[in-house]
Image (cartoon, rainbow, N blue to C red):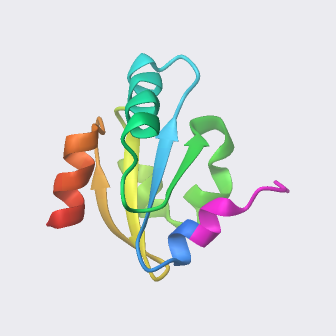
């Protein structure tokens, strides 16, 4: 059982983003660097694809949607609201404003 359960706080918050990443994902590294320089106004939690089994079991639709990394899920009040494939800062901002 993982000690860090920060993803649950993000999922249950008013609005939060979970980004699925992988070690070998260059686009994930690039997005993280961009968001470190220009943070979003919404809380973000990064989860390695290999460590996402608890999240996936609680949100099977989210798990089934994950394809091109980085992959972002926008959550609110314990529910998945939107997914962002091949996430960029711009795509995430567009999804937040939709």
Q: Residue at x 59, y 22 (%)?
A: 23
In screen coordinates, is 1 left or right of 91? right
Q: Is residue 70 visible?
A: no
Q: Residue at x 51, y 77 (%)?
A: 13
Quarter-of-image position of residue 58: bottom right
Relative to 91, say whether 94 is above or below.
Answer: below
Quarter-of-image position of residue 3: bottom right
In screen coordinates, is 61 left or right of 45? left
Q: Is residue 4 magenta?
A: yes
Q: Is residue 30 visible?
A: yes
Horizontal and vertical percent for residue 97? 17, 65
Q: Of residues 65 and 10, which is closer to you in this image?
A: 10
Relative to 60, say whether 40 is above or below.
Answer: above
Specify start and end residues of the magenta stretch as a single range. Answer: 1-9
Horizontal and vertical percent for residue 41? 37, 60
In the rendered image, which quarter contains the N terminus?
bottom right
In screen coordinates, is 34 left or right of 86? right
Horizontal and vertical percent for residue 44? 49, 54
Q: Is residue 6 magenta?
A: yes
């Amino acid at each position: 059982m993982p000690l860090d359960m920060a993803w649950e706080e993000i999922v249950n918050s008013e609005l939060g983003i979970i980004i699925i990443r992988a070690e070998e994902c260059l686009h994930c590294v690039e997005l993280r660097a961009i968001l470190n320089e220009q943070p979003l106004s919404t809380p973000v939690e990064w989860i390695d694809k290999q460590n996402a089994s608890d999240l996936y079991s609680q949100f099977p639709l989210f798990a089934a949607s994950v394809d091109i990394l980085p992959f972002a899920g926008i959550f609110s009040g314990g529910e998945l609201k939107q997914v962002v494939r091949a996430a960029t800062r711009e795509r995430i901002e567009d999804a937040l404003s939709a």
